[in-house]
Image (cartoon, helix red, strand yellow):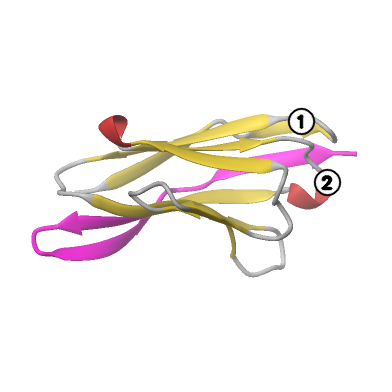
Amino acid sequence: QVQLVESGGGLVQAGGSLRLSCAASGRFGSINSMGWYRQAPGKQRELVATIISGGSTNYADSVKGRCTISRENAKNTVYLQMNSLEPEDTAVYYCYGSIRVAFRFNDYWGQGTQVTVSS
């Protein structure tokens, strides 16, 4: 059973920073892409940032210049450094991974971690 476990969410004032972490555990082969999505109350889940195994990254326009995604392949862990946080960044943040189990890649999601930015 593959699990993605997030940590690092919390309450922060506008302009502050948070670092989210997500570690994959269980029995699996390789990990292709990993990333972060978020869902604010009353809104659809949206992409924040992704990173593939080779290191290429992709960011939502709303977080470009404020967030940095990175991964530590040896630890099967992905990070999201968030700076200059705004109240609009308040959401539940979900970790995502495209992970190979047996002979196919499957999509896995973490349980979510709450990020609240106060004005």
As shown in the figure, which amino acid type bears the numbered disc 2? Pro
As shown in the figure, which amino acid type bears the numbered disc 1? Val
The disc placed on residue 12 is 1
Image quadrant in which you'd find residue 41? bottom right
Most common SS among magenta residues: strand
Residue 17 in the image: above or below residue 47: above
The disc placed on residue 89 is none
The disc placed on residue 87 is 2
Residue appearing at x 16%, y 48% in the figure: 28
Q: For mark 1, give the secondary structure.
A: strand
- Give the residues in magenta: 97-119
**Residue 6 colored magenta?**
no
Label 1 to label 2: alpha-carbon separation: 9 Å
- Residue situated in front as seen by the camera: 49 or 87: 49
- Is 59 placed left or right of 65 in the picture? left
- Is 37 placed left or right of 105 in the picture? right
Is the residue marked by circle 2 packed among few (<14), some (14-19), or many (20+) residues within 10 Å?
some
- Is 73 placed left or right of 117 in the picture? left
Residue sitting at the far right: 119
Is the residue marked by circle 1 packed among few (<14), some (14-19), or many (20+) residues within 10 Å?
some
Q: Is residue 96 visible?
A: no
Residue 32: x percent and y percent?
A: 30, 55
Mark before the other along the chain sequence, 1 or 2: 1
Residue 17: x percent and y percent?
A: 72, 30
- Residue situated in front as seen by the camera: 64 or 20: 64
Residue appearing at x 65%, y 42% in the figure: 67
